[in-house]
Amino acid sequence: MRKFLFIFIIIGAVLLIVPGVIGFQMEARYQVLLERLEQAGLSVVDTNYQRGWFGATAETELHVTVPQQAMDEDIADFRFAVHSSIVHGPLIPDGFGLGEIDSEIWVDGE
């Protein structure tokens, strides 16, 4: 009986520790994603990443660099924001996994 209790406590502890460890990894991967976006020609204006134990939220504002020959006054300064809700694994809404990211693209606050 004590063996089962000990195993149950170990499994519970692992399920509580793993999301925090995965959270650090998710934040590092998010930063790599932002670096790749900058290499693709987008400028990161502002980023706010709020990590919790079982999830995180991220808001990133991006600016598109428009080539001079394609310049139009209406789109000369095109900015948009990406709002992401991140769930750290191993337990995610769809079952088991390392994490899940749900993102929305907002233009002019909508």
Image (tube, rainbow, N blue to C red):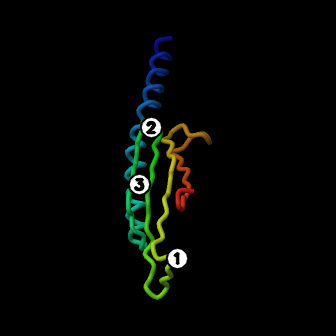
54 over 34 or under it: above or below: above
Which element carries disc 3, helix, strand or loop? Answer: helix
Q: Residues within 10 Å of mark 3 (few under 14, many from 20)?
A: few
Residue 61, given in percent of the width and then of the height, sits at 44, 60
Amino acid type indicated by mark 1: Asp
Task: Compute the Cα span from label 2 to label 1.
Answer: 44 Å
Task: Compute the Cα span from label 3 to label 2.
Answer: 15 Å
Quadrant location of the C terminus in the rendered image? bottom right
101 over 52 or under it: above or below: below
Amino acid type indicated by mark 2: Pro
Disc number for residue 29: 3
Residue drawn where x is 51% and y is 11% of the image = 1
Dot 1 or dot 3, earlier in sequence: 3
Which element carries disc 2, helix, strand or loop? Answer: helix
Residue 77, given in percent of the width and then of the height, sits at 45, 72
Q: Mark 2 points at which residue?
A: 19
Task: Compute the Cα span from label 1 to label 3.
Answer: 34 Å
Amino acid type indicated by mark 3: Arg
1 and 95: which is toward the camera = 95
Residue situated furthest right in the rendering: 94
Q: In which quarter of the image is residue 16?
A: top left
Q: Are dots 3 and 2 in contact, CB under 8 Å?
A: no
Does 88 sit left or right of 31 as displayed? right
Dot 2 or dot 1, earlier in sequence: 2
Q: Mark 1 points at which residue?
A: 74
